[in-house]
Amino acid sequence: MVTVNDDQKEFIQGVFKEREYFGEPALLLQRPYLAYTIAEEDTELVLVNRPDFLKFLEDDRIFSMNVIETLSSRLFYKSMMLEELANEQAEHRLTTLINYLCRDMVKGTALPITRQAMADMTGLRVETVIRAIKKMAQAGEFKIIRGKIIKK
């Protein structure tokens, strides 16, 4: 999910995995969706109108709790990243981001995100991200295999 500022710089707001959803805040608040979403692979979208969405929330407690947990997780992420963006140390910003993105990953799997996306998510230049990632890997924070960050 990407937003664009007045200078036409893209800012990645989030990365979604299979079976995740987006757009529910705009639907709940009856506001326009302020971002655009880019699918990096074949994707099936299910569009839901507001009355049907509200009915799902009302009728299905498990779905309602899932929406609450999803919104809470995104709010937590935004709060965490806001604090991190104020930190000037590139390695600290990247460590926080990588730990957050790896939270549900199995040990030994590759982080499915580019250096450019990490730069966009942390407000750093891609060159800075590349240097910092190499330094962090040399310090043993994670492995890099064929250019991919691997969770330890």
Image (tube, rainbow, N blue to C red):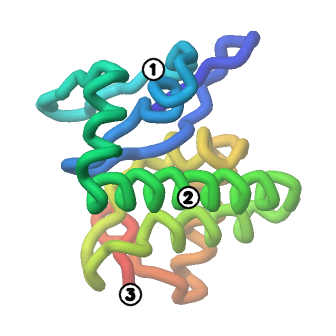
| Viewer-closest of 119 and 17 | 17
Q: Position of residue 145 (x, y in %)?
A: 31, 71
| Displayed quadrant of residue 40 | top left
Callout 1 amino acid: Tyr
Q: Which mark is residue 72?
A: 2
Q: Position of residue 108 (x, y in %)?
A: 26, 81
Instruction: Name the residue tied to disc 3.
Output: 152
SS label for mark 1: loop
| Displayed quadrant of residue 134 | bottom right
Residue at the (55%, 49%) spot, across then down: 118
Mark 3 to mark 2: distance in Å?
27 Å
Q: Position of residue 146 (x, y in %)?
A: 29, 64
Residue at the (52%, 33%) spot, across then down: 25
Instruction: Name the residue tied to disc 1.
Output: 36
Callout 3 amino acid: Lys
Callout 2 amino acid: Ser
Q: Earlier in the sequence, mark 3 or mark 2?
A: 2
Is 52 left or right of 12, judged from the image as shown?
left
| Viewer-closest of 130 and 74 | 74
CA neighbours of label 2 inside 10 A, class few (<14), some (14 to 19), many (20+): few
Q: Position of residue 141 (x, y in %)?
A: 54, 84
Which of pointers 2 and 1 indicates the residue nearer the eye? 2
CA neighbours of label 3 inside 10 A, class few (<14), some (14 to 19), many (20+): few
Mark 2 to mark 1: distance in Å?
21 Å
